[in-house]
Image (cartoon, helix red, strand yellow):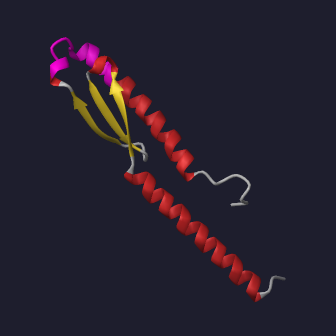
Amino acid sequence: MASFDELETLAAKVDRDFRELRDRAATASARTVAEEVAGGAGVVRVGLNGALVGVELDPAQMGWLDERRLGPMLVAAVRAAEARARQERDALLATPEGTGR
């Protein structure tokens, strides 16, 4: 049976680990990744939480684009940004190897 001191030490470690994870999650929720739309048509931004944050289109590029071209280009850029955001989030929230956490 664990002593009171051992339980207190374990509780303090769990509390530290929780606070660290909470801080990393807060950092992740505030960050975004940007992905350029093909052909320089604009930029899409996705939060590390996976949410689409914004789409910025370059008006100078809109003359040669119509919805049949632009739609697939936007979808591809959003998917690429989502994948990068997922990778960055996973790296940020990953438990450091070898720490036992």
**Residue 69 versus residue 58: which sits nearer the camera?**
58
Residue 27: % across, % down: 44, 56
For the N terminus, give its image quadrant.
bottom right
Q: Residue at x 55, y 46 (%)?
A: 90
The residue located at (45%, 40%) in the rendering is 85
Residue under the point 65% across and 73% down: 13
Q: Residue furthest bottom?
A: 4
Q: Which residue, as the protein is rendered here, is positioned at the far top?
A: 64
- Determine the residue positioned at 15% across, 14% down: 63
Going by the image, does 29 lie left or right of 66?
right
Q: Is residue 8 left or right of residue 66?
A: right
Q: Is residue 91 left or right of residue 65?
A: right
Residue 89 pos. (x, y %): 50, 46
**Residue 48 occupies which quadrant of the picture?**
top left
Residue 62 counted in the magenta span: yes
Where residue 17 appears, as percent x and y from the top left, is 60, 67
- Rendering quarter of residue 47: top left
* Dominant secondary structure (helix, strand or loop) of the stretch shown in magenta: helix
Q: How many marks?
A: 0
In the picture shown, does residue 3 fall above or below 32? below
Q: Which residues are magenta?
A: 60-74
What is the quadrant of the C terminus in the image?
bottom right
Q: Is residue 55 above or below residue 9?
A: above
Left or right: 79, with 64 as reference point: right
- Residue 77 lies, in percent from the top left, at 37, 26
